[in-house]
Image (cartoon, rainbow, N blue to C red):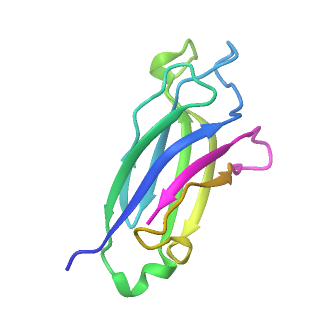
């Protein structure tokens, strides 16, 4: 039997604008068990709503509790006037498998976005359902 982890990226709110024009175009990257998945980009939206599910295969169910899920919110540079090709970091959340719920018990949980370094300017939170 193959076990799956579903990460529903519900929404984000009160994000800090990073495009120099008071906005940005955010997307989310979820990284779990060596697999990366990405949401769509929400054009110029400080309070984006995705309501999208990202599905991951669990390689070792016995060690599920210690597996790490990293959620990173970024600004998609393709939709802004920013220079360079690198997407701007808008915040992240790191969770372990022990924090996931069983299917049928999931509800949206809001996590404050964390910084990459002490010099990062980050604000906002992200709503997730993880089961």
Q: Is residue 38 above or below residue 18?
A: below
Residue drawn at 51 percent across, 79 percent down: 66
Q: How many marks?
A: 0
Is residue 123 a member of the stretch shown in magenta? Answer: yes
Residue drawn at 51 percent across, 69 percent down: 68
- Of the pair 110 and 112, the residue shown nearer to us: 110
Q: Is residue 62 above or below residue 5?
A: below
Q: Quadrant of residue 81?
A: top right
Is residue 91 a member of the stretch shown in magenta? Answer: no
On the rendered structure, is 4 left or right of 67? left
Furthest residue in direction bottom, as rendered: 62
Q: Quadrant of the C terminus?
A: bottom left
Q: Quadrant of residue 48?
A: top right
Q: Residue 61 location in percent, x, y?
A: 35, 82
Identify the main secondary structure in magenta: loop
Furthest residue in direction right, as rendered: 118
Q: Quadrant of the N terminus?
A: bottom left
The span shown in magenta is 114-131
On the rendered structure, is 13 left or right of 100? right
Q: Residue 99 location in percent, x, y?
A: 56, 72
């Amino acid at each position: 039997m193959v076990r799956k982890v579903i990460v529903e990226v519900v929404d984000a709110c009160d994000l800090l604008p990073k495009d120099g024009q008071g906005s940005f175009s955010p997307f989310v990257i979820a990284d779990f068990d060596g697999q990366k998945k990405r949401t769509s980009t929400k054009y110029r939206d400080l309070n984006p709503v995705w309501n999208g599910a990202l599905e991951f295969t669990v390689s070792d169910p016995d060690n599920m509790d210690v597996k790490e899920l990293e959620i990173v919110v970024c600004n998609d540079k393709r939709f802004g006037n920013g220079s360079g090709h690198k997407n701007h970091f808008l915040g992240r959340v790191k969770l372990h498998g022990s924090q996931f719920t069983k299917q049928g018990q999931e509800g949206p949980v809001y996590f404050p976005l964390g910084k990459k370094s002490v010099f990062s300017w980050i604000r906002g939170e992200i709503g997730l359902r993880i089961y």
